Amino acid sequence: MKRRTLIGAIGATTVGSAAATGTGAFFDAEVDRSVSATVTTDEDAFLSIESVNDEYTESNADGELVLNFSGNSEGDGVAPNSKYKFSTGTPGLFSVRNQGTQEVELSFEGPDDYDNPTLEDDDISWGLFAPGFGPPYTLTPGDSRSFGAVIETGEDPPESASFRYKIVAEDPE
């Protein structure tokens, strides 16, 4: 056998072996694992939501915190053409505590701008805010922040209104 033929045969065998064994990379896999989670109340969750003002907060049947401005022992609700701030000082209406292991940034979905609700026509609008702080609201593990609410009404608001809100905690990065 000629030397060039022998070197070519060895080279072809090496390339063929590498192609047959591959590079170790893969493009598809299935790995079966289990996940466990405990469902708990708002107060005991990783993102704890706790009432600090029983006059305007309550828990529903699912253990979720509800803000209720329909009346208390002194009044029956909010008046037309007005702006009310509830619990603008400490301790607020409710607190949010980071009981997880990483820093989070809080935001709200549902209410208007934290301290300046947008009043549409003669309707009713509301927002959430942290007294003395503006968004973003960053919580390190163990930190908590108290929040209040602002409700603004126009000239002819509905007799009653109901709103939903969502507290979102995200990685600030």
Image (cartoon, helix red, strand yellow):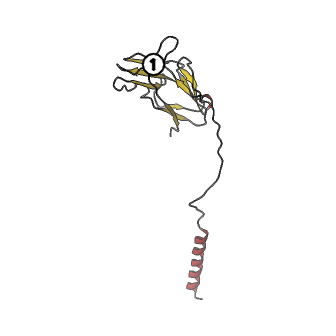
Q: Quadrant of residue 50?
A: top right
Q: Quadrant of residue 41?
A: top right
Label 1 belongs to which residue? 85
Residue found at x 60% / y 58%:
29
Residue found at x 66% / y 42%:
36
Q: Nearer the viewer, residue 104 or 148?
A: 148
Q: Which of 102 and 51 is in front in this view?
A: 51
Residues packed near mark 1 inside 10 Å, few (<14), some (14 to 19) or many (20 plus): some
Q: Which of 74 and 142 is in front in this view?
A: 74
Of helix, strand and loop, which one carries label 1? strand
The location of residue 1, given as percent across then percent down, is 60, 89
| Mark 1 residue type | Lys
Residue found at x 58% / y 65%:
23
The location of residue 125, given as percent across then percent down, is 41, 25
Is 76 drawn above or below residue 115 in the view shown?
A: above
Residue with the most extreme bottom position: 1
